């Protein structure tokens, strides 16, 4: 009874907060949701045009290559950017009512996750158009998706706590994500670098997840076990650090507002 | 004697103020480097102890900055005491500030459900209670209105209606009964008396001594975080009023 009720209560809170975040974000318009899918597609179109026409990129299935990079990076960016302010935006609530604080981050992430899911569907559509053959290995994509979601949530926990403490985090993080984008090999291939440098790219979790997508979709190959462990390792690490901060600061957060 | 529902044991809260609020990383580093980073600690609540039993209605009195709201935050587990302990047996519905946790873009019904969820109830429970809450607040005509279009009196009505009608074991009200029109105030006082009669506990913070005298059977008097007195209503209220008079005549 106790545990089932607890889950029910938490689910109710999660649903109501999600509803609120949706109402605020899209102002109850369908076009709002449509826009968040069209946006990334237009960016993709511009990037594809620029890199194939102006920079002479002639890789096979380049649009799909680009799409994989954009898809992963955009989800991470959106999820962490909206997540970053989740604690601060709800300061008026958690300083007056005792609620589990991670709920604010979770509910804010729902819309990014829906966008991500729609974009994955569009990616598959592009695969069909571009003549990339589907195979059973596509199902394995659930693994990097799971890791990516966990990694983004963990990063969101860390960022939301930092943002509460330092209000200029947003600008710093803005610059950081720009750097991250260039380091994630979204529109270029790392083959031109020496092998040692190529390994350095694996220090970037986002690159790891993008690479997984490309291996499955474009190279039709399953990554090694060590690659799987690395993917999961980053995700678990982010979640652990985030949880520790939230646990330690749980009663301290309200001093910062 | 039966078991205490709320037991507050030598509770102290070390409150932090200063530069940690509203600071940027750049400022933080600069202040640390120039050694001007300044954080002050003070005892917002200092060694407070009391016990409440079934059917008690506690009034907390004291001047501004006495630590009343901080103490309530400790009881509702929003803050952790830096010393001492608080034991609470039962679920709490607290109204620490009117309108807090309500969202301006949602309508009245959505806000009521959101509040219910935050207070730790289930959807089934809210489905059952919501008609009653709406009826008590007398705001049926405003059900579908966005919250920002409601007056603050209306917001406080719905807030009180939710907190009192979900039948919490412990109801905590911080300065909330002073709003709303006269008729609704009477109605809410009657509702609170009914809650207490059912053996529930209520904690009320108010600057209106007459209201405390009318409603409460126990009173806690705080001053600058310290517990000056805890006991029977008339006894403590008399002392407090004498204290207020003396303070004024000295000036």
Image (cartoon, grey):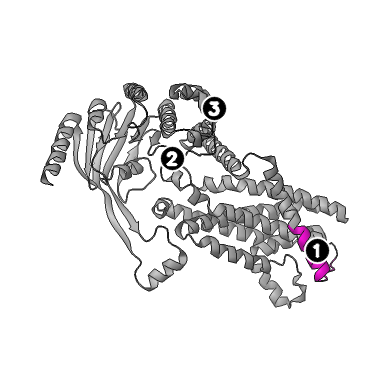
Question: Which chain letter matches label 2?
Answer: B
From this view, report whether residue A17 is shown above or below residue A48: above
Look at mark 1 in the image and give the residue it sits on: A49
Look at mark 2 in the image and give the residue it sits on: B100
Residue under the image location 51 percent in, 39 percent down:
B104
In terms of image quadrants, where is residue A22?
top right
Q: Position of residue B31 (x, y in %)?
A: 38, 69
Q: As drawn, is A93 to the left or to the right of B243?
A: right
- Gap between marks 1 and 3, in whole Å? 53 Å
Question: Which chain letter matches label 3?
Answer: B
Q: Position of residue B78 (x, y in %)?
A: 39, 44
Q: Nearer the viewer, residue A249 or B208?
A: B208
Look at mark 3 in the image and give the residue it sits on: B124
- Could you tell which of marks 3 and 2 lies nearer the N-terminus? 2
Residue under the image location 82 percent in, 53 percent down:
A126
In the image, the segment drawn in magenta is A43-59
- Gap between marks 3 and 2, in whole Å? 24 Å
């Amino acid at each position: 009874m106790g545990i089932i009720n607890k889950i029910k209560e938490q689910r109710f809170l999660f649903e109501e907060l999600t509803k609120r975040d949706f109402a605020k974000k899209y102002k109850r318009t369908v076009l709002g949701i449509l826009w968040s899918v069209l946006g990334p597609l237009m960016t993709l179109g511009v990037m594809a045009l620029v890199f194939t026409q102006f920079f002479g990129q002639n890789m096979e299935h380049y649009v799909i290559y680009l799409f994989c990079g954009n898809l992963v990076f955009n989800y991470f960016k959106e999820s962490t950017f909206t997540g970053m302010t989740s604690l601060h935006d709800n300061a008026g609530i958690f300083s007056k009512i005792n609620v589990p604080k991670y709920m604010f981050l979770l509910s804010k992430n729902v819309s990014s996750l829906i966008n991500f899911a729609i974009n994955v569907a569009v990616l598959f559509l592009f695969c069909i158009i571009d003549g990339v053959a589907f195979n059973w290995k596509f199902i394995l994509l659930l693994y990097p998706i799971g890791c990516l979601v966990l990694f983004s949530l963990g990063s969101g926990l860390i960022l939301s706590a930092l943002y509460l403490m330092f209000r200029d985090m947003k600008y710093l993080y803005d610059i950081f994500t720009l750097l991250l984008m260039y380091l994630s090999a979204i529109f270029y291939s790392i083959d031109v670098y020496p092998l040692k440098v190529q390994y350095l790219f694996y220090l970037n979790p986002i690159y790891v997840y993008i690479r997984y997508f490309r291996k499955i979709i474009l190279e039709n190959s399953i990554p090694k076990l060590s690659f799987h462990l690395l993917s999961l390792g980053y995700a678990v690490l982010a979640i652990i650090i985030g949880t520790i901060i939230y646990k330690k600061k749980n009663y301290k957060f309200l001093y910062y507002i | 004697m039966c078991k205490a529902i709320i037991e507050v044991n030598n509770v102290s809260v070390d409150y932090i103020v200063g530069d940690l609020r509203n600071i940027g990383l750049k400022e933080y580093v600069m202040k640390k480097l120039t050694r001007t980073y300044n954080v002050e600690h003070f005892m917002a609540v200092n060694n407070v102890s009391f016990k409440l039993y079934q059917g008690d209605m506690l009034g907390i009195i004291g001047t501004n900055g006495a630590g009343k709201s901080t103490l309530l935050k400790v009881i509702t587990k929003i803050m952790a005491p830096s010393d001492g302990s608080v034991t609470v047996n039962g679920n709490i519905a607290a109204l620490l500030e009117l309108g807090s946790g309500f969202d301006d873009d949602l309508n009245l019904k959505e806000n009521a459900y959101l509040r219910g969820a935050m207070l730790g109830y289930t959807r089934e429970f809210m489905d059952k209670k919501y008609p009653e809450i709406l009826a008590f607040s007398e705001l049926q005509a405003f059900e579908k209105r966005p919250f920002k279009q409601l007056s603050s009196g209306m917001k406080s009505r719905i807030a009180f209606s939710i907190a009192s009608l979900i039948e919490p074991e412990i109801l905590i009200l911080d300065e909330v009964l002073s709003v709303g029109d006269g008729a609704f105030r009477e109605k809410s006082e009657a509702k609170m008396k009914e809650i207490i009669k059912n053996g529930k506990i209520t904690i009320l913070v108010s600057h209106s001594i007459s209201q405390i005298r009318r409603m409460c059977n126990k009173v806690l008097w705080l001053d600058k975080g310290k517990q000056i007195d805890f006991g029977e209503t008339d006894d403590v209220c008399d002392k407090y009023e004498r204290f207020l008079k003396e303070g004024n005549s000295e000036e």
